[in-house]
């Protein structure tokens, strides 16, 4: 009788523990973590499953540190662990990242001690944990010793290679897995899509997937990323549009593709759409949107992102910090770029490069030098991109000697072999201050074959200083390279026009026509009323078109009374002379200016971005606008920043 009572009591206790465990799991899955903790604490006789389930509840609610703390508590209480416990705590450790590598190693040692060191599921979790915690060596060590290996083992190792940017090795492992007869699932296909070396192989995987990608976001998101990686924006958008249930990763991938390929307006529109669907953006989202803002000059939207992240409890990472510094720098807000840089804890060489690129205006060379010295003192090694930013900044500041010193330091102090873009920067730097013979000599003697960009930079310098002789030589080499657009030809045509050589102008026009060349369409953008507005030359599509044109006509008359005359020599298209001033008046950058004047408060700074160089007549127009209307206007064209203020431009009339 006593024995039966004991058995009944034990069964009752086991039942209570089982029900308590079920309750903890239910609360955890319903995101009610406080109730889960309360239910866990009420379990009188907790077993190893109780701890595993509570750790899982913490993990599902992104409380990974608490999951790790609970695991340590169970160890101290000398509880026997099970497979589920190790899988759960290793996943939490992976989420916590590199700072928790030692904790991950301790869990690994404990798993071995309790007989789970060769458990296939635990080993797969170990590979994932080590990869996420930045120890590829340990991940590879676990994988090599595994026997047998299954699909998850291979997928985890492919992801480990990817996490450390070993894409070639990752794809080779994927092919090895196939050769061993292991059939991929959607996760393996997604891992392979992230590292496939060519678009053809990516498309082949897409064919193998069939309709899988429309049934699950896992493959769809990977396909969007793959097509985006190879610049197939239309294909990426087609896959994205076909995803029935879009998740955060779906939007993040598509926003990143748009931001990367200079379609910032669509990136921001998609971000707004995502918020409308009540999807909570994460740091990856914000980083991509900041990249889009930097390309559009969307300072207001960028500041909103900054404010949102600063007001939240999400820790930032180095990619976000770099994107934020870069956004302020590209929007001409040097002070804010420096303040953000000084406040952010995590920096890398790209963050430093973004800061130095912000110091590109005259009078800022001391800040650039200070940043470079600080970077070296903190043990951050500059790379070739850093020096490109430095050379561009020196060029835009008109400091050739400082640029030459950095060029020497690049080779002698850092052992970095200058690449063609570095030589191109130096040619621009010399040309900017009128040292045209030195610039031409560098073009001819550099250890790379000069391309169209290099010769065009020299030609641009010749146009500014009116050197027809060197300009004609540069132009001849450009025509031999036969570029696909008319930009360099128009530069030469303008030089001939200013020199009154109309027969040569006619020859340039003839060559443009014979070769079927066209100038890329000029586009200008301005942020107004929390939207990005885009204009082309002669635009009539904007809802405020009539008001914009009327405002520009009004400004034109005001400037004409002050002595402004349109420089129609810049217009080389075959139209009547009477039409040319009107063509200039409605250039895309002026249309953007007109909208800015209509929609902003008096005295507010205007930010405009143009995809081509600002034309000389618009440059003169903007200088007068800044003086007559008491406006500060920032224009970022394809080559540099122009800060128009009190009748002058920061570029010193060289661009």
Image (cartoon, rainbow, N blue to C red):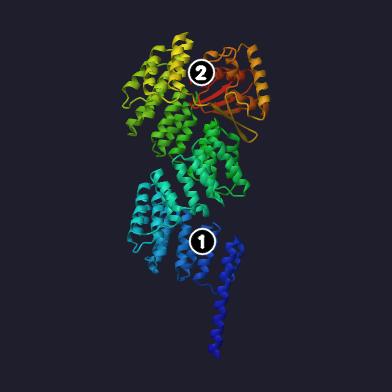
Q: Quadrant of residue 309?
A: top right
x, y percent for residue 442? 34, 21
In this picture, is 487 found above or below 496?
Answer: below
Visible in this render: residue 163?
no
Circle 1 residue? 67
**Residue mark closest to the camera, 1 vs 2:** 2
Instruction: Residue at 58% x, 19% y: name it.
Output: 583
Quadrant showing the N terminus: bottom right
Q: Earlier in the sequence, mark 1 or mark 2?
A: 1
Q: In the rendered view, tell whether residue 463 sits above or below residue 530.
A: above
SS at mark 1?
helix
**Would you say residue 639 is visible in this rendering?**
yes
Helix, strand or loop under label 2: loop
List x then y, in percent, for residue 23: 59, 69
Q: In front here: 238 or 415? A: 238
Where on the picture, by quarter, is residue 552? top right
Alpha carbon of mark 1 to alpha carbon of mark 2: how far? Answer: 62 Å
Please give the residue where the numbered disc 2 appears in the rendered image.
653
């Amino acid at each position: 009788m006593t024995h039966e009572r004991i058995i009944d009591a034990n069964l009752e206790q086991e039942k209570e523990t089982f029900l308590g465990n079920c309750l903890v799991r239910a609360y955890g899955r319903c995101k009610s973590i406080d109730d889960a903790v309360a239910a866990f604490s009420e379990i009188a006789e907790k077993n190893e499953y109780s701890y595993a389930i509570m750790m899982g509840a913490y993990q599902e609610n992104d409380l990974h540190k608490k999951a790790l703390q609970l695991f340590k508590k169970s160890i101290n209480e000398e509880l026997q662990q099970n497979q589920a416990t190790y899988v759960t705590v290793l996943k939490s450790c992976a989420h916590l990242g590199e700072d928790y590598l030692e904790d991950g190693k301790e869990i690994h040692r404990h798993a071995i001690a309790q007989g789970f060191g060769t458990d296939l599921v635990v080993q797969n979790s170990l590979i994932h944990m080590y990869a996420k915690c930045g120890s590829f060596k340990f991940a590879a060590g676990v994988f090599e010793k595994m026997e047998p290996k299954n699909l998850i083992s291979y997928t985890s190792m492919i992801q480990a290679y990817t996490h450390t940017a070993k894409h070639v090795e990752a794809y080779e492992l994927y092919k090895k897995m196939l050769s061993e007869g292991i059939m991929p699932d959607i996760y393996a296909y997604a891992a392979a899509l992230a590292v496939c070396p060519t678009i053809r192989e990516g498309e082949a995987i897409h064919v193998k997937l069939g309709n899988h990608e429309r049934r699950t976001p896992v493959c769809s998101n990977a396909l969007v990323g793959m097509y985006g990686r190879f610049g197939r924006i239309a294909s990426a958008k087609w896959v994205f549009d076909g995803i029935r249930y879009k998740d955060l990763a779906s939007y993040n991938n598509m926003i990143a593709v748009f931001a990367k390929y200079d379609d910032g307006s669509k990136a921001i529109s998609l971000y707004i759409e995502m918020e409308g669907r009540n999807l909570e953006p994460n740091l990856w989202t914000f980083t991509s949107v900041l990249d889009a803002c930097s390309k559009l000059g969307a300072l207001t939207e960028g500041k909103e992102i900054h404010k949102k992240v600063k007001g939240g409890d999400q820790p930032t990472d180095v990619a976000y910090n770099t994107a934020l510094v870069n956004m302020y720098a590209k929007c001409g807000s040097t002070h804010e770029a420096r303040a953000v840089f000084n406040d952010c804890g995590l920096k890398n060489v790209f963050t430093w490069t973004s800061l130095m690129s912000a110091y590109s205006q005259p009078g800022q060379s001391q800040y650039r030098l200070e940043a470079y010295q600080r970077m070296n003192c903190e043990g951050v090694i500059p790379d070739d991109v850093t020096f490109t930013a430095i050379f561009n900044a020196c060029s835009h500041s008109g400091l050739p000697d400082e640029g030459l010193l950095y060029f020497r330091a690049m080779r002698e102090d850092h052992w970095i072999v200058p690449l063609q873009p570095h030589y191109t920067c130096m040619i621009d730097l010399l040309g900017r201050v009128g040292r045209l013979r030195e610039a031409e000599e560098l073009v001819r003697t550099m250890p790379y074959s000069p391309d169209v960009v290099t010769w065009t930079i020299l030609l641009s310098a010749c146009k500014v200083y009116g050197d027809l002789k060197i300009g004609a030589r540069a132009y001849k080499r450009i025509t031999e390279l036969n570029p696909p657009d008319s930009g360099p030809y128009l530069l030469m045509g303008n030089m001939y026009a200013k020199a009154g050589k109309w027969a040569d102008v006619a020859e340039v026009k003839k060559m443009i026509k014979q070769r079927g060349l066209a100038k890329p369409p000029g586009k200008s953008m301005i942020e107004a009323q929390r939207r990005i507005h885009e204009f082309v030359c002669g635009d009539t599509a904007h809802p405020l078109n009539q008001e914009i044109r009327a405002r520009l006509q009004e400004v034109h008359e005001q400037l004409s009374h002050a002595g402004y005359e349109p420089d129609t020599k810049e217009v080389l298209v075959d139209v009547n002379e009477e039409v040319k001033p009107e063509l200039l008046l409605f250039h895309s950058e002026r249309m953007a200016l007109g909208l800015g004047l209509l929609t902003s408060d008096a005295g507010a700074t205007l930010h405009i971005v143009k995809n081509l160089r600002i034309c000389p007549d618009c440059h003169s127009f903007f200088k007068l606008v800044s003086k007559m209307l008491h406006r500060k206007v920032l224009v970022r064209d394809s080559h540099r920043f122009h800060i128009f203020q009190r009748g002058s431009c920061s570029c010193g009339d060289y661009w």
